[in-house]
Amino acid sequence: MSSIEKQFLITGVSSGFGRAFAQAALEKGHRVVGTVRNDDAIASFERLAPGRATAVRLDVTDIEAIEPAVAGIEGNIGPVDVLINNAGYGHEGTLEESPIEEMRRQFEVNVFGAVGMMKAVLPFMRRRRAGHIINITSMGGFITMPGIAYYCGSKFALEGISEVLAKEVKPFNVAVTAVAPGSFRTDWAGRSMIRTDRSISDYDALFDPIRRAREEKSGRQSGDPRKAAAAVLALVEAEDPPVHLLLGADALTLVRDKLKSMSSEIDAWEDLTLSTNFAGA
């Protein structure tokens, strides 16, 4: 483990996981640059630790603004040792009922924004031969549930991108970890979720109870964001961090069940799978 002071760049520090990650890093004596979306949030964030907490106004969907913002941080504040791509939100709605524009917006924030941030910090980390990129995904990047196809799709994408990037930058001593939380007591299922209006009655029996249960559970999830933040700090200090990390008992159980089910399905269809090669190949 290492206790060397680091500079973190964390997207979306106004609330939820982003705020918890920032507070945990500041309490450990690190410096944090956090992205926010308005001036009020700047003052609120910088009061957490004057001189060590710096807020930068940045919308991660403004791809053209990301590179100069990161270059400014590197040049004027200091080297970014750890990037935490936290900014994101949830979309809820059956696929047939949800406009394609809502999928595009979901991917702009959860995927393209995160990739833009990674591309901006990588030249600096690669030249220094040091750095750690942490992408906050979700257990929804492994498992799926009816009604969040766009969200799960974005998190599956970010999991895959993270895994590929980890292989590409390992020779440069840059680590990449996709952190997949389960249900935590944040605003994800509350004000941070976009919900598509219902329009097709055929889905009522399946989806209405799911939407109702998710709304009722919001604010009462079992996961503690402060403990998630402590886990992320431990991850940053690890000498050999993993490429994938699950957070929460529900994530662990559900992902293990998915892997067992998937393995059984692969076995059941193995003969058909193997029937597609040329003879003798």
Image (spheres, rainbow, N blue to C red):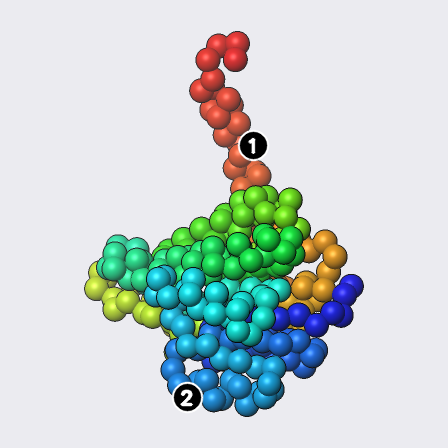
Foreground residue among 207 and 151: 151
Q: Is residue 212 above or below residue 257?
A: below
SS under mark 1 = helix
SS under mark 2 = helix
From this viewpoint, is residue 50 visible?
Answer: yes
Q: Which residue is mark 2?
A: 40
Q: Quadrant of residue 261?
A: top right
Amino acid type at circle 2 is: Asp
Which label was assigned to residue 267?
1
Q: Residue 4 appears at what percent x and percent y?
A: 74, 69
Foreground residue among 108 and 259: 108
Amino acid type at circle 1 is: Asp
Labels 2 and 1: the sequence-earlier one: 2
Q: Tell me which residue sits at (59%, 57%) in the image.
A: 125
Q: Tell me which residue sits at (34%, 65%) in the image.
A: 62
Q: Residue 92 appears at what percent x and percent y?
A: 35, 65
From this viewpoint, is residue 205 visible?
Answer: no
Q: Tell me which residue sits at (50%, 22%) in the image.
A: 274
